[in-house]
Amino acid sequence: MWDGLFQQFGAHPDLWLATLELFMQAQRQPQLRTRLADGLTEGRRGMAAILESVPEEAVSERSARTVGMVQMALMSGMMIQFLGDPDHPPTTAEMLEGLRALARIVDDHP
């Protein structure tokens, strides 16, 4: 999944930059912010559904607010890093290694 997403960041940078511009515009336009918030809610549910291999309507609110939220945070963070330094983009292996290291740190220091 991540390899494909990283390829999309490289193949269509203008599309992903437009996503960032949308977030900036939403900060100045309350109606747009409301629509964006609704889209984020749907996106979290969709991400959780993909990861859990279930239909979106089967995703619990808890799963959308945890699994979906973290997945979207990773996706947006990786997008910013990829677009900000396209000559040295993060790799899937590096991201997964970092996640595993973070999980160990959290487990060691609850």
Image (cartoon, helix red, strand yellow):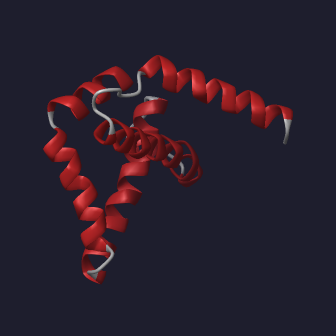
Q: The N terminus is located in which quarter?
A: top left
Residue 1 visible here: no
Q: Residue furthest right?
A: 109
Residue drawn at (46%, 31%) of the image: 51
Across and down, in percent, residue 61 comes to 54, 54
Q: In the drawing, does residue 51 fall left or right of residue 40?
A: right
Q: The C terminus is located in which quarter?
A: top right
Q: In the drawing, does residue 2 fall left or right of residue 101?
A: left
Residue drawn at (47%, 40%) of the image: 74
Vertically, is 45 above or below 86?
below
Vertically, is 86 above or below 74?
above
Across and down, in percent, residue 108 comes to 85, 32
Across and down, in percent, residue 53 comes to 43, 29
Q: Quadrant of residue 92?
A: top left
Across and down, in percent, residue 65 comes to 55, 53
Vertically, is 75 above or below 2?
below
Q: In the drawing, does residue 71 fall left or right of residue 76?
A: right
Number of labels in the image equals 0
Q: Quadrant of residue 23?
A: bottom left
Vertically, is 69 above or below 49?
below
Residue drawn at (28%, 23%) of the image: 4
Residue drawn at (32%, 42%) of the image: 84
Q: In the drawing, does residue 96 fall left or right of residue 6?
A: right
Residue 96 visible here: yes
